[in-house]
Each structure stands twice: as structure tokens, then as C-alpha cells.
Image: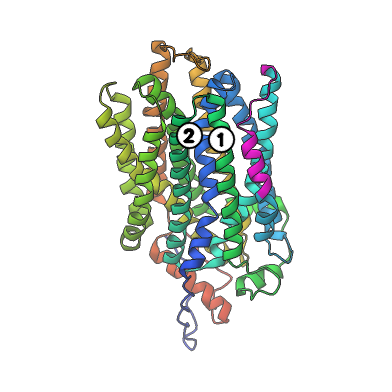
Amino acid sequence: MAMSNPARSESSVPPKPTQPEKLNLSTKMAYGAGDMGAGITATLLAFSLLIFLTNVAGLSPGLASTVLLIGKIWDAINDPIVGVLSDRTRFRWGRRHTWMILSGIPFGVFFFLQWVVPPINQLALFWYYVIVSILFNMAFTGVNLPYTALTPELTQDYNERTSLNSFRFAFSIGGSILSLALGQFIFKVIPNDQTQYLVLGLICTILSVLPVYWCVWGTTDPTAAGERRSPQTVEESNETEIPFLEQLKIAFSNRPFLYVIGIYLFSWLAFQLTAAIIPYYLVNWMGQESYFTAALVVQCVALVMLFVWNLVSQRVGKRAVYFMGMSAWIVAQGGLFFLPRDQVGLMYLLFVMAGFGIAIAYLIPWSMLPDVIELDELNTGQRREGIFYSFMVLLQKMGLALGLFLVGQALDFAGFLTNEPGQPIPEQPASALLAIRLVVGPLPTVFLLCGLILAYFYPITREVHAEIMLQLQERKSGTDTSADEGLELE
């Protein structure tokens, strides 16, 4: 690591960095609640949508996975645009809250419509789900992307951000646990397959929309009319706006940002592959009647470990914690591939180990991103949270889409037999069972190993971040003689 930082004038004494204001519990709770809807919807889509489209709606695995892929291709265009528009929004509710308020209701409506099976032919059904998927993803982006961009605007403290993200993902995983518990209960008391998903979808729609408005009510958007703006927000609002393509160029010239998005993409892709194939793995390989119990175990462990990893991170740093969690996850994924069909107890032990790593996939990359944004501010003099967060949200959705698409295509290629609603589950051919085991074991392991390699070379340590914040503070106080040089990481 090399720091281009000419000697400061001997007559000027660098000021001590001001202590960032600590966030109170109610603000953290309200902010965390904003991700509950994302946790609920993302969990049901990851664990249930593919098997719903094949076993309830009647689409082939190939068509079902194509529905999901098309919806996410739109996100490749939609997410960066919303990120830039969010940065440029000027309205009395604030640039982040405005988007959340207006997108909250459509977000719920289009989520529910994904669990409706219209009485139309398969081709028309395919296009129905494509259109609903596109509209849902647009609304999801309108809520979730501005929400995630609130993080660096609420606090600049290195450890406080990790704490804030702990609350965020506690609500996110808590929402996912609630949705899975509801699914387990509803599937037991309602016999009809289609009605099961309709009831579950309706309840989860309500539970997803209400916390969005709790978040808006309980947090402060510093750009809202009448609010006291932070120095960086005032500075940002007076800047000359940079064209979209130029912003992309600047964002992707930030080398630590490339590490973060790589770490996040590989971690999230491994999780989505596992989530998509677990229902098939449990029902067709392990002979279980339901997949909700196993999913609950994983998410409950991840919820507890969020707070454990947060405490450990404050002592050893984010990179070391990432290595600890990923190592346990890799062992778990490999174990699922070799697991005999009668070892149900060992299977749940492996799911517990996977939960250790999944908590890391939620917590650490999102805690790294604000540090990257501050490095960009130091080197460019501008804050562009929206553009950085837009690509993180985009990668989350692309990981989901790619994971589900790979699962659907693999099952289709391997000759997976879909079952008719109300009929016994057919015995799958050996090729389909092997495909299920490959997707649950070796394939996610490869992605996790790639994430570990990137984490090893990630350059922003606790000490580097402290230097970044010191230089930013000196620049704002007018005592930094090397402000134009920034910080160069090699």
C-alpha cells in the first residue's frame, strides 16, 4: 500500500477527527426495518419461486428460469438509472425517502401477483410472469436502492456502520425467518398447492410494505425540506452533476470497489444457488416432505451470527471475519454433496455451519461499501452513494437471477421430472439427482473460494480507513495541504 501524501506544513497542526454522532436505538430499529420487506420477498423468491413455477404454475424448468432471468436483465438497466436519479432527486421528502414512499405500494402489489396462476395457456402464462417480474423488480429497486444509500448519510463512523448494518440484516433475516415460518404453518393447514402460495403471498405482501414506511417515519433524510443537512450533503447538492457514463467510469476506477463487488457477487451467487436448489435437494434427494424447516435453521443461525460477527469484526477487522465465516460455509457445501440420503441429522449440522457463512455474506460486503465511498470522496471531492449502491443492489439481483437460471437449466438438461399438482412426487432419474447434488455442493464452493481470494487482497483495512477519515476531516476544516492528492492504494 502506497500513500501519496506530501509532508504537511510544520506550522499547521492536523485537527483531531471529530467524534461522529452515535445513532440512537430507535433510529437503528427504524433503519433496520426498512430491509424487512426485502428479506421477506427475496427469501420467498429464492427458495420458492422456481419450484412454484414448475410444480404449481406448470412451467418447464427451462421456461421458469428464463422468466427470472428476463426480469433481472431489466435490472441491469434499471438499477444504475435509479441510483443516479436518486442522487439527483430534489423533493421536500428528501432524495431517498421520496423514492421509498412512492414505490412502497407497487412493490407489494407486484410481489403478490407473482403467486397468482391465471387460467391461460403456457405461452401466455410465461409472458404474464415475465411482465409481472419486470414490474416487481422496478418497484423493488425504487424502494431498496435509495434505502441502502441512506447508510453513509446516517453515520460516518467505521464501527457504527457495521452496527447499523447488523440491525439492517437482523430485520432482513428476521423477515426471512418469519416468511419461512409462515410458509411451514400455511402449508400444513392448507392442502391446495395454489391456495397455499396465494395466502402466503398475501400475508407476506402486507408484512413487506408496512416496514418501508416505518423506516421513512423513523429515520432522517438530510436532504428533506427543513432538515439540517450534513456538510457532505450540502457540498454534494452544490456540485456540478456528472454525466452517467462518466460516473460509471469513476466508480469502476475505484479499485477497492471492484474488490467489494467481486466479494459480494461470489458470496451472494453461492447463497442463491444453494437457496434455489435446497427445495429439490431436500424433497428429491433426502426424501423430506417440506423444505421450510431446513431453510429456517439456516436463517436462524445466520441471524444470531450477525451480532456475533459484528462483535468479532470490531476486534479483528472485516477481512479476518470474512475468512472465518467463509471457511465454515465451504465445509458445509462440500459436505452436502457427499451426504448419504439417510443422514438427516448430519444434514442439519451442515446447515448450521452454512448459516455461519451466510451471515458474513449479508454483513461484511455491505459494511465495506461505505469505506469505499469515502475513499472515492477523498480522491474526487464528491459523494456519489447512489451509483455505488446501485451496482451492489444490481449484483444482488443478478446473483439471484443467475443462480435460479443455472438451477432451472441444469434440471431441464438433466431430465428433471415435474410433478402434477396433487400427485405423488415422481422418482427422479439418476442424472437429475446428480445435477441437484452438483449445484448444492461443488458449484457454490467454487464461487466461495473466488470470494476468499478477493477478500485476501482487499486493501482498505481499519488503519487505512482511519487515514481516509483523517484526510477528509482536514480537507473540510481547510488544514489539509495535500487534499488534491487523495489516497492511492496499491
Name the element at disc 1: helix
The C terminus: image quadrant: bottom left
Give the label on residue 254, or none.
none
Q: Position of residue 101 (x, y in %)?
A: 67, 56
**Amino acid type, residue under disc 1 in the picture:** Val
Indicate the quadrant containing the N terminus: top left, top right, bottom left or bottom right: bottom left
- Whether the magenta-drawn stretch holds residue 186 is answered as no
- Whole-percent x, y for residue 407 in the image: 49, 25
On screen, residue 400 versus residue 285, left or right, reads right
Q: Is residue 289 above or below residue 84?
A: above
State the residue position of label 2. Answer: 186
Q: Is residue 477 left or right of residue 339?
A: right
Contact (Cβ within 8 Å) of mark 2 with mark 1: yes
Q: What stretch of residues is rendered in magenta?
A: 105-122
Q: Residue lying farthest front?
A: 189
Q: Assess disc 1: are there few (<14), some (14-19) or many (≥20) residues with their C-alpha within 10 Å of its C-alpha.
A: some
Residue drawn at (36%, 28%) of the image: 441
Instruction: Give the labeled residue for mark 1.
Output: 199
Q: Secondary structure at mark 2?
A: helix
Distance of label 2 from label 1 (alpha carbons): 8 Å
Q: Amino acid at mark 2?
A: Ile
